Image: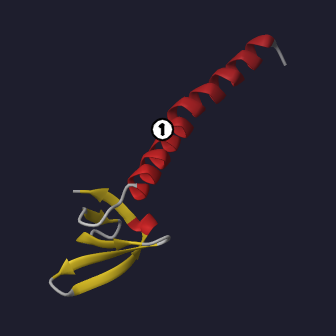
Amino acid sequence: MSYLSLIYLVFLIGLFYLLLVKPQQARVKAHKQLVSELASGDEVITMGGVHGKVKSVGEETVELELADNVVVVFAKNSILAKK
């Protein structure tokens, strides 16, 4: 294997890391921060597209109030974004 081939291989691996791995790590970090900062009263959207207000937050679950007297339990990881 020549040096040029080795340099090309290292370049491709670096490019792969910068374009795919690094942005995914940033998205995972941002989602973990979002989930850890959930508090009662936050309006959120789940991955399924359900909109609701956080009623209470547990270790692994979140209770969302979808309408008056309608409370549904979701996994914390299913929260996509805050409104």
The residue drawn where x is 33% and y is 70% is: 48
**x and y, in percent, of residue 63 in the image:** 34, 77
**x and y, in percent, of residue 39 in the image:** 32, 62
In screen coordinates, is 22 left or right of 73? Answer: right
In screen coordinates, is 15 left or right of 35? Answer: right
Residue 45 vs 8, above or below: the answer is: below
Q: Which residue lies furthest to the right in this view?
A: 1
Q: In which quarter of the image is residue 56?
A: bottom left
- Which element type, helix, strand or loop, lies under badge 1? helix
What residue sits right under mark 1 in the picture?
A: 23
The residue drawn where x is 31% and y is 56% is: 81
Nearest the eye: 60 or 45: 60
Q: What residue type is labelled 1?
A: Pro
In screen coordinates, is 18 left or right of 42? Answer: right
**x and y, in percent, of residue 47 in the image:** 35, 65
Q: In which quarter of the image is residue 42?
A: bottom left
Nearest the eye: 48 or 35: 35
